[in-house]
Amino acid sequence: MSRQRRVSSFDDEGVRSLLTSYTYEEVEEIANNILKRVKCRPSLGIICGSGLGKLANTVTNQEIIKYNEIPGFPVSTVPGHEGKLVFGQMCGKSVVLMQGRAHCYEGYSPQKITLPVRTMKLMGVTTLIVTNAAGGINENFKVGDVMIIKDHLNLAGFAGVNPLVGLNDDRFGPRFPAMSHAYDVELRRIAKATATDMGFDSFFREGVYSMMVGPSFETVTECRYLKLIGVDATGMSTVPEVIVARHCNMKVLGLSLITNECIMEYDATNFANHEEVLQTGEMRSKDLQAFVSKMVEHLSL
Ligand code: HPA
């Protein structure tokens, strides 16, 4: 295996932790440490985006570990991100749910924010459902719509932000992983069928998600640019997690909750803000909980 010269990644402070990536052995140690503390053996992982933490309400037989009790785990500093791993059962399936995630804009490296995904992999997770809050670029989208992600645009990657930068360990996956089928076709089919069965077609959409690092929201020109290049919704997360999940061959479903309309007019007087993001999460939280658990019922894991 190729080993990177690195300082300890177990220090949570300072610039050093921004520069390190984790070795296979370190991730294995973290996964084993967690598995010693819970009975559940999850095959499905779910990451809850801003304001979507209530998805955990559908998990029974809960066993909870806080991120700050896991050495090396990134802890989110953002309101709406609780910082807990919730293990348990959802419709008879063993799941681990991340209530809250860390972001690059908090100062974490893309390698660090994706550590939980590799940890899930080494705990036995084979399918990942990733959720986020996003701004609607597509003018047909309304606040409260849910977009099934069919592809992403790693705009942050254009600027060198990619979690796979660094030496590759083939035990996780190949040096040059394909991303042309990042969002699993069959999972998308099940998601669409589930939305139809539940009578949710009026607010379910499908589209392309793009990630910019943030934390500033987009300018009007940036929003117009995103529209021009085929983006339907934009946010500050998800893409690094999906890249790492696909690198280690997990199947991925991505869902964006449209929490605000991106501003396309230079003279507009309204503007994007985090409170609106959290309020929309709250408004759709029951529907999304019902949707995700129905989907999980239909998954063969
Ligand atoms: N832009 C970027 N990220 C977001 C937005 C947005 O408009 N809304 C929620 N997350």
Image: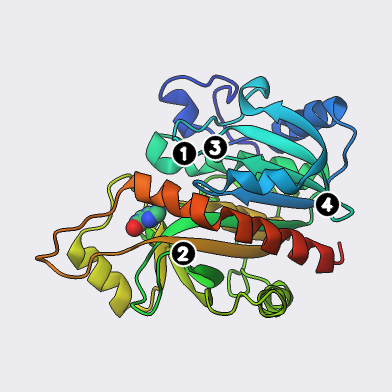
Q: Secondary structure at mark 4?
A: loop
Q: Which residue is mark 1?
A: 109
Find the distance from the CA under tag 2 to the CA under tag 4. Answer: 29 Å
Ligand 1 appears in which quadrant? bottom left
Counting the numbered discs, the total is: 4
Which amino acid type is marked by label 4?
Answer: Ser
Find the distance from the CA under tag 1 to the CA under tag 4. Answer: 26 Å
Q: Which residue is mark 3?
A: 112
Q: Contact, CB < 8 Å: mark 2 with mark 1?
A: no
Q: Which residue is mark 4?
A: 43
Apparent side of residue 217 relative to residue 237 in the rendered image (left or right): left
Mark 2 closeness class: few <14, some 14–19, many ≥20 residues within 10 Å: many
Q: Position of residue 82 (x, y in %)?
A: 56, 33
Q: Secondary structure at mark 1?
A: loop
Q: Contact, CB < 8 Å: mark 2 with mark 4?
A: no
Q: Which residue is mark 2?
A: 144
Q: Position of residue 233 (x, y in %)?
A: 41, 67
Which residue is at a point 68% across and 64% down the rendered structure image?
Answer: 291
